[in-house]
Image (cartoon, helix red, strand yellow):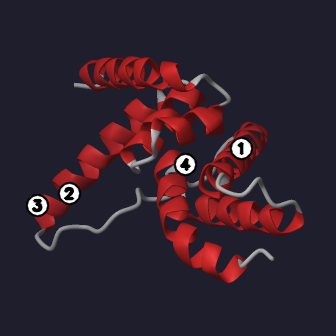
């Protein structure tokens, strides 16, 4: 029997944190995380693959929501961007600088292809190569190379933003 409560307690916070970083929008992240857990109840994954499965389903749900949002935004010609996720330092100057840096990194991440962005964020979240490979349907032996390439692309995006 699937213990959804225990799985939620174990995986929701890291899933939400990852999706927040992926999307830059905590509302989209929460909806995508919720959708992943609904799908978990509807059709559980193979035992032992739950974490990677939740992140894969959450990632796809978030991307779908973002694509839909971009289409709506184009149609409506506007929209309000949400503030970046994170705690602001207590001093105003530090808070402003941290906000500028978060926005700079967000722009650089947004400049990456979706797969590279997802791989980097899962890697940063502490996923094993096997879990990243399962989430993106790629061979395990190629994950290290994919992370390295994505990091080089991110570094280039950050240099271009200077």
Q: CA distance from mark 1 to mark 2?
A: 32 Å
Q: Which quadrant of the view contains residue 135?
A: top right
- Judged by depth in the image, the label closer to the viewer, 4 or 2, is 4
User: Mark 3 = which residue?
Assistant: 93
**Quadrant housing the N terminus:** bottom right
**Quadrant housing the C terminus:** top left
User: Mark 4 = which residue?
Assistant: 23
Q: Secondary structure at mark 1?
A: helix
Q: Which mark is residue 114?
A: none
- Judged by depth in the image, the label closer to the viewer, 1 or 2, is 1
Q: CA distance from mark 4 to mark 1?
A: 11 Å
Q: CA distance from mark 4 to mark 2?
A: 21 Å
Contact flag, marks 4 and 2 (Cβ < 8 Å): no
Contact flag, marks 4 and 3 (Cβ < 8 Å): no
Contact flag, marks 4 and 1 (Cβ < 8 Å): no
Q: Position of residue 47 (x, y in %)?
A: 71, 58
Q: Position of residue 51 (x, y in %)?
A: 60, 56
- Which residue lies most toward the right here? 42
Q: Residue 139 versus residue 99: which sits nearer the camera?
A: 139
Q: Which mark is residue 60?
A: 1
**Which comes before the other along the chain, label 1 or label 2?**
1
**Which comes before the other along the chain, label 4 or label 1?**
4
User: Mark 2 = which residue?
Assistant: 96
Depicted 156 relative to depicted 110: above or below: above
- Which residue lies most toward the bottom here? 5
Q: CA distance from mark 4 to mark 3?
A: 26 Å
Q: CA distance from mark 3 to mark 2?
A: 5 Å
Q: CA distance from mark 3 to mark 1?
A: 37 Å
Q: Is residue 42 left or right of residue 25?
A: right
Q: Is residue 32 left or right of residue 18?
A: right
Within 10 angstroms of label 1, few (less than 14), some, or many (20 or more) residues? Answer: some
Q: Position of residue 116 (x, y in %)?
A: 51, 27
């Amino acid at each position: 029997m699937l213990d959804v409560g225990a799985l939620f307690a174990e995986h929701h916070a890291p899933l939400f944190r990852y999706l927040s970083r992926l999307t830059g929008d905590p509302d989209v992240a929460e909806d995508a995380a919720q959708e992943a857990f609904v799908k978990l109840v509807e059709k559980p994954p193979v035992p032992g693959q739950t974490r990677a499965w939740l992140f894969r389903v959450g990632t796809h749900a978030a991307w779908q929501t973002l694509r839909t949002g971009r289409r709506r935004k184009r149609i409506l010609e506007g929209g309000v961007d949400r503030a970046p996720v994170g705690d602001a330092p207590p001093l105003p100057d530090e808070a402003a600088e941290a906000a500028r840096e978060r926005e700079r990194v967000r722009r650089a991440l947004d400049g990456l292809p979706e797969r590279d962005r997802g791989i980097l964020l899962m890697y940063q979240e502490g996923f094993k190569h096997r879990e990243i490979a399962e989430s993106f349907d790629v061979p395990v032996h190629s994950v290290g190379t994919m992370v390295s390439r994505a990091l080089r692309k991110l570094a280039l995006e950050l240099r271009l933003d200077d």
